Image (spheres, rainbow, N blue to C red):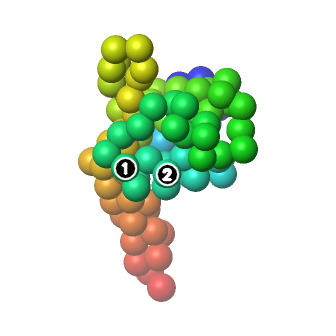
Amino acid sequence: MTESSPETNAPGCSPDSRAVAARLAALSHPARIEILKHLSARNSCCCREVVDHFDLAQSTVSQHLKILVEAGLVRFEPDRQRSRYAIDHAALADVSASVAALVDSCCSGR
């Protein structure tokens, strides 16, 4: 992933914890959250369609999409001259389940 941090490569952490941390890092930018919301309203769309929806440069949108793809949260599908992007619903459900499990384990003693 492009924006890896020392925490996601921390020794002693389980591979599952590192994977969840990498996906959460990809979700840590407000523009990427908005891009996911935009993609969720469609089956798939090209980068240009995302650019047209937001006040961001094409290169900025491309970089955000790249980070989401590398994290496994968005699927990339080549489509002739344009690439299509779609949410990986199973990956987002896994993130949700991981966060819910973390909250449950941290709050179970209350």
Picture coordinates of residue 85 (x, y %)? 40, 33
Which class describes the residues within 10 Å of circle 1: few (<14), some (14-19), or many (20+)? few
**Nearer to us in this view, 8 or 44:** 44
- Left or right for 82, reference 28: left
The residue beneath circle 1 is 42
Is residue 62 placed above or below 53 in the rendered structure?
above
Q: Secondary structure at mark 1?
A: loop
Residue furthest to the left in view is 90
Residue 31: % across, % down:
65, 47
Q: Give the residue type that dot 2 points to.
A: His
Report the residue at 52% width, 38% height from top: 49
Residue found 48% across the figure and 85% down from its top = 110
Q: Residue at x 48, y 41 (%)?
A: 23
State which quadrant residue 72 falls in.
top left
Q: Which mark is residue 82?
A: none
* Placement of 107 over or under 1, stated as above or below: below
- Outermost residue, bottom side: 110
Q: CA distance from mark 2 to mark 1?
A: 7 Å
Tally of marks = 2
In this rendering, the answer to whether 32 lies above or below 61 is below
State the image quarter where residue 79 is shown.
Answer: top left
- Relative to residue 68, is residue 83 depicted above or below? above
Q: Secondary structure at mark 2?
A: helix
Would you name the residue on which mark 2 appears?
Answer: 38
Q: In percent of the image, x 31 and y 45: which residue is there? A: 43
Residue 109: % across, % down: 44, 80
Query: Are the residues at dot 2 and dot 1 in contact (C-beta closer than 8 Å)?
Result: yes
